[in-house]
Amino acid sequence: MKMQPATRLHLALATLLVCLGGCGGDQNPANVDEPDAGTTTPGVVNVLCSPVSCEDDTALCGDVDDGCGGTLDCGPCANCEVDDDCPALPCRDLVGCEDSVCTYAAVQCEGLACGCPPGTSCSTEDLRRCGFDACGASRCDPSPTRDALGHTSFANMCVPPPPVNEPCGTCDLGYLSCGDGAARSCVDPAIPTVDRNAAACPKVTDGARGTSNTFVYLDSEAAPENTDGGDMEGSEPPSGPIPDGSPDNPFTDYASALSAAGSRNASIIVIAGSGVLNPIDAQGDMLPLQVFNDISLLGGFDADFAPDPSQRPRIIGVVNDVADEPSFVAVVVKNLTLPTALEHIAIETSDVPDGALDDPTFEDPDYGRHPNNYGVWLTDSTGGLSLLDVTIEMGAAGVVDSPIDGWSAAVFCTSGASVVSLDPATTQHITVPTIAGPPGAIVGKVVNCRQEER
């Protein structure tokens, strides 16, 4: 025969008072569902959430509505005769009614106990993580249901871990990341000129993503339509739809994307893949990539423009007469008056080969030929260039027939008026040669710039 409600109440209260005086043994052997202040742990009464508490609720066990929008975990039930007397609990398996006490164990997924992380609390609907990996492990999904009599049951299903790099943030350009093992967080683009509240996201019509007045989309790995950077005059019309810079019909060359960004007053070119971005001139020669005022470049996306940090568009160094002297240079920046950024981009220059700059066009009347090697070259850019999660791999400078050796600089400014800011990720991923060409050559990460930290 089952106990009458009054008998059950007195027995439970007696058990509760004993536990308040100090119950022996581990009250939470599975170390799960450890709540924060304002909720209760098994065997401990919480009176912070008034007016309901485990002392005066007739359930006296299991999860109880605390009357202020949360749930109280009132610990194991102390009044059972058979297993059916024990209420269901989220992500807890009923072991059985033993010695008139309902005994539970944490649900396990892939051999790992599931529960709320220590120091936090979970609602009856929240997924519980399994093990100590906050991101990569499976989850227990309580999936509570309530029957017509008001009894709650829990499916307590094991579900796969959440996907990594799932889109989030501004126009789905950010991604959810496990980070350092803490709970997942959204890694949104860090470009400072993005107004996240006013950004115009691509509109979806009949399942197709259209153009945007904030973002222009470029696929760095798609073959260019022609060799002159987007000028269609004199070329055969391309097959298929003409690129319009939308995510579903992106541009395939930097010049076209840059032109569209200027005409639409867009502030960011979003780049898919890890292809080379350098434009090509009408003669088929590769040029340095020039960055223009208030048009930032953002990489880190797959061919569908889903976030993919493994993708990093490349800008490579080529021979150029920037600053009227022979140089290898990858990125040219002139006259920035507004903050502009490169984010998640790779900049690479090779060693200056012997004899590569024998062209007399590059002859300096005062110093002869002394080929420099620049990753980013800036002049008159007081608005500031931000390098965010950019990798820069520098080759060595060289000398042809000059008494002055070349310089190898990851970032070089023609005067201290130009402003550059590097985030820690960029600072850590700048590689310069140990020896830059012949003896006496100058090597530097950031040379002659007014540097600001982010």
Image (spheres, rainbow, N blue to C red):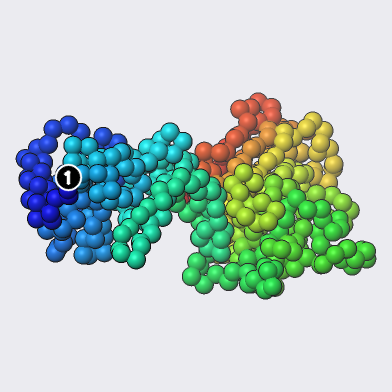
Q: Residues within 10 Å of mark 1 (few under 14, many from 20)?
A: many
Write down the quadrant of residue 440 in the picture: top right
Residue at point 60%, 42% (across, down): 391
Residue nearest the viewer, comparing 154 with 287 = 154
Q: Secondary structure at mark 1?
A: loop
Q: Outermost residue toward the front?
A: 1
Residue nearest the viewer, comparing 72 with 419 = 72
Spot occupied by residue 393 in the image (x, y as percentages of width and height): 64, 37
Residue at point 28%, 40% (across, down): 96
Please indicate, yes or no, whether residue 179 appears anywhere in the rendered image. Answer: no
Spot occupied by residue 419 in the image (x, y as percentages of width and height): 53, 54
Write down the quadrant of residue 371 in the picture: top right
85 sits left or right of 145 in the view: left
Question: How many numbered callouts?
Answer: 1
Residue nearest the viewer, comparing 115 with 425 = 115
Spot occupied by residue 319 in the image (x, y as percentages of width and height): 77, 44
Write down the quadrant of residue 279 in the picture: bottom right
Spot occupied by residue 374 in the image (x, y as percentages of width and height): 66, 43
Q: Amino acid at mark 1?
A: Ala
Residue nearest the viewer, comparing 331 with 151 = 151
77 sits left or right of 268 in the view: left
Q: Is residue 226 above or below residue 158?
A: below
Residue identified by numbered label 1: 78
Residue at point 74%, 64% (across, down): 249
Please indicate, yes or no, whether residue 175 appears anywhere in the rendered image. Answer: yes
Residue at point 68%, 41% (across, down): 348
